[in-house]
Image: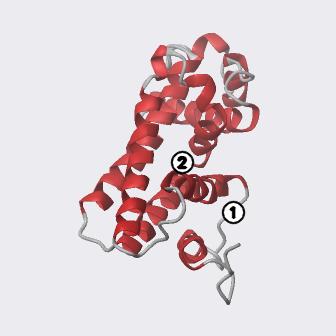
Amino acid sequence: MTERSSSREAILEKAASLFATRGVAATTVRDIAGEVGLHSGSLYHHFESKDAIVDELLRGYLDDLLAGYRVVAAEDLDPKARLERLVQVSLDTVAAHPHATEIYQNDFNLLREQPRFGYLKTAAAEVQRVWLDAIVLGADAGYFRSDIEPRILYRVIRDVVWLSVRWYKPTAAYGIGQLADDCTSILLDGISIKPRRRR
């Protein structure tokens, strides 16, 4: 790795942490440069702007996520196995891009209105479509409940999976695979031993 690419990676790493904890709007180029040990002007040798850093972080995250989803969509899986794989891909991507996941979750509404980040809406629509297709397919095949609106199920699943980035810290005893298994079990089987009677 060259010195330039090493500096670039250090900038991305420090900026990602700052954006995730402070938010994009509250983080300045000077903040990022200070974390890396550079003068603000030197940072512009690596990135044209703060937005360029955010852009690179989010594109890497979304490229990996959507690539994983497309692989799952192409696989010949029953609906339960498809949902399990989508959960696993999602959590693997969160683990690979924890800060970018938080940036996306926290600053999506701010960024999506800027022309540079117009692709966020497209990516969000594809993510939602992949999940809704899996949910509807499962309901039609009798695997999942059909009495709940698919978009509600999607939102519940989305929050279970994506918001885990805010609290889950992997350990040797409880890795990302176990979290994926437990999330899938809760989503598919619930937490009740006996089914609850509907009101």
Question: Residue at the spot x=42%, y=27% of the render?
Answer: 119
| Residue situated in front as seen by the camera: 198 or 194 | 198
- Quickly name the residue at label 2: 97
In the image, farthest residue toward the bottom? 194
Residue placed most toward the observer, 115 or 171: 115
Q: How crowded is mark 2: few (under 14 residues within 10 Å), some or many (20 or more)?
A: many
Sequence-wise, the earlier of marks 1 and 2 is 2
Q: What residue type is labelled 2?
A: His
Left or right placement of residue 30 versus residue 74 in this view = right
Residue 168 at least partly seen: yes
Q: Position of residue 46 (x, y in %)?
A: 49, 20
Q: Which amino acid does label 1 sit on?
A: Lys
Residue 85, given in percent of the width and then of the height, sits at: 41, 67
Res 106 → quadrant: top right
Q: SS class of the residue under badge 2?
A: loop
Q: Which mark is residue 71?
A: none
For this view, does 173 lie left or right of residue 76?
Answer: right
Q: Is residue 1 shown to the viewer in this render?
A: no
Residue 62 position within the rendered picture, expressed as x and y whole percent measured from the top left: 44, 41
